[in-house]
Image (cartoon, coloured by chain):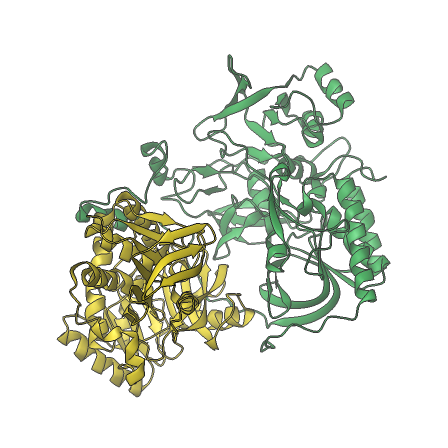
Amino acid sequence: MAGPKTIIIGGGIVGLSLAWNLARRGWTDLTVLDRDHLNAGASARCGGGVRSQWSTADNIRIMKRSTELFASFPADTGFNNWFRQEGYLFLAYTDEQAAMFEQNHRLQKENGVDSELLSPAQIKAKAPTINTDGVVVGAFHQKDGVCFPFAMVWGYAKACRRLGVQVLPFHEVIGLEVAGEKITQVVTNRGRFAADLVINGAAVWSPNIGRMCGVELPNCAEKHEAIVTEPLHPFLGACLIPMDSGMYLAQTMRGEIYACVGLEKGPATDYDHTFAFAQKISRLMIRLIPRLAGVKMLRQWGGFYDLTPDTNPIVGFVDRPSNFYQYHGLMGHGFMFAPALSEMIAEHLVAGKLHPDIAPYGLARFKSGGLEVEKMIIG
Amino acid sequence: MQRFRDHRIYTHHEREFDRGREITIDFEGHPLRAFSKEPVAVALYAWGVRVASRSMKFHRPRGLFCLGGRCMSCLARVDGLPSVRTCRVPCRDGMKVRRENAIPQATDDLLHTLDFVFPRTLHYQEMFTRPLALNKLLQKSVRMFSGAGDLPDQPLSAPPLREREVEVLVIGAGPAGISAALGAVEGGAKAVLVDDAPELGGHLVGWPEPLLGAADGPAWIAAQHTRLEQAGVETLLGAECIGRYREGFWALHHEGGLVLVRAKRVVLATGAYDQPPLFANNDLPNLFSARGLMKLTNRWGICPAVACTIIGADDAALSLAERLPEIGVRVLGLVTESTKIDGDPDRAERIQSRGVPIFLGHRVTQAIGDFHLKGLRLEPVGGGEHVDARCDLVAVSAPGAPSWELAAQAGAEVKFVDGQHGFVSQADAVGRTRTGDVFVTGEMLGPCSPARAVSHGWDAGVAAAFDLRANDPRPAARGHTPEP
């Protein structure tokens, strides 16, 4: 029993982690299509951050599970993801932010996440190089961490292929053929693929795929940019998020300082790197860690957040075509959510068990006004 | 205890070396005599410091290779700043220099044992993935050894952002770039010429052969220096272009700050990357690119070793074979996989008549030595008995890989061209790319001789200026105006 003939559109962490979870459950008649090489899209452009410090119970629970999956990834797939659990440290600069931290902290505790609130002195002790001027309070969770994003994609792809999944880069989907209620064929620039089930995991390009069979999707691409410096000997364990700017900054496994912040609001059309970003991020980085002044920037690049109107993902079947499953709209945190979400979705598809945490994410919710808004979306 | 001996040549039968004024630098606690025009990397090499740095992963000893700011073998901590390209920074009195990325020190780095434990390679992506406890241990130890340098000692303050507008910006001041700047002025434009090196001329600073009527590279550069002054070309040295931004400017890193240049036309002349040869142990210290070695010996007057083997038989290789003996280095021979000599045959004959063999149809299979270079192993291309050449110096003369990065950022088409050793910017006969306002010239278009670089650079410069005069200035690109 190899399961239905399933085509997954999008070979990022979303598509590949779902493919692996399906294949492990016996659905091996799977093909993952990507229009570019692996690691060309958002999965490789992100910072690789993984955290359970969120402001809604659903997100906290999902990320608690995902963190476990990141930690066991090397053993599960035979591929090192260099997931380093040295914590996420949020810094509040106003009483309002501090109140939000306290509220989140209570909710996180209730949901089994052992986060803590730190005074400026405790922050200084944890990360002596950082400037704590103006910091009211910090929020820290030791099990949060940072991994090497490319390795997650490589690892999933390799594990998928080992289970017999076809992973096909450079296959751009150019059409979907619908007969009656169902998609029957996925047409690419390199040939056609018959399908019993089609999964749309194309992130910001999902609306283009949806339109090929008359499904309108509300996703909007927002450009964010990132930078890395030259590699330095390890001096910073935690990933830092000063809430006044919304920047996040971490030292990677190789020692580079990675930082990211949003600049342009609204629908984006290009990935281009900008000087405005380089200037803004350098100032923020130096303000937070003054000794970074003089460190060389190696690269900067842009990537897309896949925004939805209520900041929550879009997961589930649409009414028509009936074999068209959506899995996108993961904002700026698809990378960290994908391992746990894919596990739940695979259970849903294979065993028919709809996990209560993903049940509210259907496309139909937008007709009734959407869901609770997540307040801790950063970058 | 490290011993230092000065390898500089202070008396040469026909040349003087312009090193600038005598100063003292501090190298890992040792005061060393240096000169104000000498790059730090050169001053250290002059004192016998062969291990310039340690490689990132296996901590292999690395020595100078290209001396052109491209190979990254000379990274060291300078005055509290990590990973400075020491071949690009002139010495200053009292400057403090220290090698990094070694435990406890670059000469005896314990982490080099990794290289012996994993002699083939290190498949770190897939090793020790199970059990989880072992995996955690692996991650912890890898983390401990990551990075190259430490954070700067002190926060630096940068000078304020500068902005300027120019008519023709020429990036790269080698033979093609110098000529392009002069060509642009001839075509009626104002030109600004920039380079990340502290002096004009690119690799020609070490080129000892006659060039377009000048006795050698330095003589040609000196003549151009005068012409550039007369033509009113502004030259900005020690200025590195870090990128072309879509806001419509080129960002230069200069004197610790940034200069944003809006240019109506740009000529890129950023040259080619010297390529390391492909054989085992190809990174041992004292294995140089031919151009790197020419700079070290001809420009800076340093005697690097006792016996040299030269890989290649083109003009640069033949030049080295003829001139190294003048500074007391014995040339054991030249090796090339090719069955014919690429350079001047008369010169090759002259060299052979002095008892220096040229091994045609031979390839190098490995460099011998585990810390110091001790020789090369050669083998006929078709197979057969190998020969070991015992030498303590190797020069590799091979076509460089064209640089392409700035052209690609500007929107030029860049294609992989096998016969031209890498990615080549696509351009018409005068170097015009599809962007309309960006021209490319010199070795960016594939290997070429200095004379050819000069003539093509001139054409590209003239074309850029004509193009500027023929068309209305383009509207400035959209984007923000940076704050001062």
- Residue B248 place in picture, x, y as percent: 64, 69
- Residue B324 place in picture, x, y as percent: 67, 28
- Residue B113 place in picture, x, y as percent: 34, 35
Q: Is residue A261 above or below residue B459?
A: below
In the image, B389 versus A308, the foreground residue is A308
Chain A drawing hue? yellow
Question: Within the image, what quadrant is residue A335 found in?
Answer: bottom left
Left or right of B148? Residue A349 is left
Left or right of A66? Residue B238 is right
Q: Is residue A238 visible?
A: no
Q: Which image quarter is the C terminus of chain A in?
A: bottom left
- Which residue is located at x 28 percent, y 62 percent? A338
- Which residue is located at x 33 percent, y 47 percent? A166
Chain B drawing hue? green
- Residue A208 place in picture, x, y as percent: 44, 67
Q: Outermost residue, top direction?
A: B385
Question: Within the image, what quadrant is residue B43 found in?
Answer: top right
Q: Is residue B400 above or below residue A378?
A: above
Left or right of B266? Residue A267 is left
Q: Outermost residue, bottom direction?
A: A96
The number of discs equals 0
Q: Is residue A165 visible?
A: yes
In the image, B361 versus B43, the foreground residue is B361
